[in-house]
Image (cartoon, coloured by chain):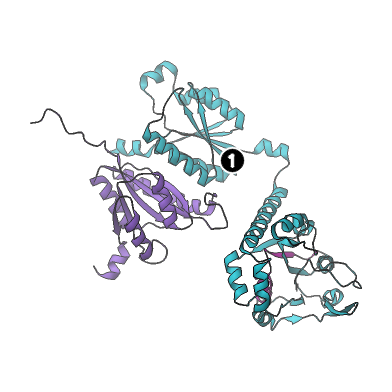
Chain colours: A cyan, B purple
Amino acid sequence: MARGHYRILLGMAPGVGKTYRMLQEGRQAKDEGRDVVIGYLEPHDRPETAALAEGLEIVPRLQARHGALELEEMDTDAVISRAPDLALVDELAHTDAPELRHEKRYEDIEDVLGAGIDVISTVNIQHLESLNDAVFEITGVRVRETFPDRILDEADEVVLVDLTPEALQDRMQAGKVYKRERAQVALDNFFRIENLGALRELALRELAEDVGERRRPILLDPLSQQAVSERVLALVEPQPKSQRIIRRAWRSAQRLGAEIDALWVRKPGHQPTEEELTQLAALKRLSSILGVHFVEEEGDDLVATVKRVADDRGSTYIIVGTPDERRRVEILRGSLLSRMVRELPGIDIRVVTDRALRESRQE
Amino acid sequence: MSLFRRKQPRPGSKRVLVPFTRGRLDPSVLAAAIRIARAEDATLVPAYLIVTPREFAVDTPMSLQVEAAMPLLEAVENASLKAGVPVDARIETGRTPIHALQRLWDVEGFDRVVVPAAAEGPGFTPKDLIWILAHAPAETVILRPQDGVAQNGS
């Protein structure tokens, strides 16, 4: 049987709206005709959350006892035998009552997924095992209920439910997360703005890394990747026309799935004019916005410098503007483009025309 | 007659900034900006302003927004060069269009700013326009787009 689809809603702290989002998604799936049940819901005495759960079937909970405590847990077997398309299971890092089959709820979820049932679950970043020390340093609170990092790795989707620290504090103050008496204590401790900011950063970073990891399996093995990967090198000068060269190079790089470098070769001893400095700063800003690596090299011989940089960076594609050459130099030394073609074998060269020249010729 | 000619500014040395955002620049505004630049022998600087969400560093590459900016800038450059006006396009990022604009004129000088007012939907809001008028480092012209003119019957 195929394993169910696992979607985890990750938040920076309680109250950001994970459970609410889980119920919204559950309702939407139900509206689309899917069979949806609530495997376990932690309503936290939040009326809005309870209202959203109305109309969704709830699998009765299992009554468990821990010492003098009466506990309610997800009835994993009941969820599996009910066999819905999708089960909503809150708080995957929860520690089960001792008499249950598993120690942790994420293990119960594994069973549900194994039965071919899709699961949407929720968790806060502070429960992630590898971040336990970092969270302790930030908040001064040692989180006891943790879950292993592999759970996020193995999930089909991890979605960040995000809220700004200020908005979360507003929700706390309005009594939407905890009752007002408890809210003030929480705001003075765990929910301090600096704690929330740091936790949010952790959550965002974790998700960004997760996205990066997920992209890897579809890539080729390193050898094949090296064989087919492209790297674009755009040759620029501190002139307005170079903005277009970088933009053109970026578009080519997007199509090729390539990294991109922009290179300015400065003549030895050349002191840029004020205008050149302005243009240079603008090119560097554009490079930063487009994710282009800007390289500045000194060299008397443009083609030799380009060759050296192209070799160093593994460039496979060079984009250059229309050369601004005097006819005499071209006759004496050979044109820049023909030298590039000769001296950079195996590298594609593309010339971006200067539109201004074309327009002036047509006039 | 004076023996010395008064030094004329080099053609294209004046700079006319036309900021725009969110995938739109009204053609009538562009035409007007080109006319202004040509009349003043200036370089047109169309600047596409990208809004970076607060979750990301302000200079984070935003591929989708850049993707929207590219054809627009090409079109603006073509129109400008066809009219014989030199062009020097920019892309700038910020938390809001106004923030991006401020970041741009913090590092570059302009002689005139031509701002399109939004007819409807995204663009510079009336509040933005007031801010621009108060803070722009150069003489500022606010242009109403064609459809806005038609709607107002003026």
Q: Which residues are magenta?
A: A3-29
For this orientation, the residue located farthest to the left is: B1
SS of the residue under disc 1: strand
**Residue occupying image coordinates x 62% and y 60%:** A194
Q: Is residue B149 above or below residue B62?
A: below
Q: Quadrant of residue A104?
A: bottom right
| Residue A28 on the magenta segment | yes
Q: Quadrant of the C terminus of chain B?
A: bottom left
Front-most of B69 and B114? B114
For this orientation, the residue located farthest to the top is: A332
Front-most of B78 and B62? B62
Specify the subunit that label 1 lies on. A
Q: Is residue A304 left or right of residue A355?
A: right
Q: Is residue A336 left or right of residue A256?
A: left
Residue A40 at x, y percent in the picture: 77, 75
Residue type indicated by callout 1: Glu
Task: List the residue tagged with mark 1.
Answer: A259
| Residue B111 on the magenta segment | no
Q: Quadrant of residue A76?
A: bottom right
Residue B26 at x, y percent in the picture: 35, 58
Residue A167 at x, y percent in the picture: 58, 68
> Is residue B27 in view?
no
Residue B150 at x, y percent in the picture: 28, 67
